[in-house]
Image (tube, rainbow, N blue to C red):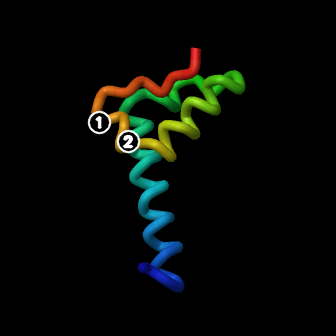
């Protein structure tokens, strides 16, 4: 179990990688409405699913 500052560093790295992956899958193209913002947030948090072809765009 990871404790202390390493836990927050790992969490930060996970979210940064998620943002990079979400950006590469075009989740930040148009953040004009709530659905697009929620889709981007889901893509950042659940980014490993994007590599399996899961579409997290909320329609």
Q: Is residue 14 above or below residue 23?
A: below
Q: Residue at x 43, y 63 (%)?
A: 13
The residue furthest bottom is 4
Q: Is residue 3 above or below residue 59?
A: below
Question: Which mark lies nearer to you, 2 or 1?
Answer: 1
Q: Quadrant of the N terminus?
A: bottom left
Q: Quadrant of residue 39?
A: top right
Q: Is residue 32 above or below residue 11?
A: above
The residue furthest left is 52
Residue 5: image x %, image y %? 52, 83
Q: Secondary structure at mark 1?
A: loop
Q: Secondary structure at mark 2?
A: helix
Q: Residues within 10 Å of mark 2 (few under 14, many from 20)?
A: some
Q: Earlier in the sequence, mark 2 or mark 1?
A: 2
Q: Nearer the viewer, residue 23 or 38?
A: 38
Q: Quadrant of the C terminus?
A: top right
The residue furthest right is 34
Q: Residues within 10 Å of mark 1 (few under 14, many from 20)?
A: few
In the image, taking residue 32 as reference, residue 20 lies left or right, namely: left
Q: Residue at x 49, y 64 (%)?
A: 12
- Cα separation, mark 2 vs mark 1, equals 9 Å
Residue 30: image x %, image y %? 58, 23
Residue identified by numbered label 1: 51
Q: Are marks 2 and 1 in contact (CB under 8 Å)?
A: yes
Q: Residue at x 63, y 32 (%)?
A: 38
Residue identified by numbered label 2: 21
The residue furthest front is 1
Q: Nearer the viewer, residue 45 or 32?
A: 45
Residue 7: image x %, image y %? 49, 75
Residue 18: image x %, image y %? 43, 48
Q: Quadrant of residue 31?
A: top right
């Amino acid at each position: 179990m990871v404790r202390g500052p390493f836990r927050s560093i790992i969490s930060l790295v996970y979210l940064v990688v998620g943002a990079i992956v979400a950006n590469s899958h075009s989740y930040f193209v148009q953040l004009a409405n709530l659905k697009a913002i929620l889709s981007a947030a889901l893509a950042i948090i659940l980014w490993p699913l994007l590599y399996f072809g899961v579409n997290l765009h909320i329609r």
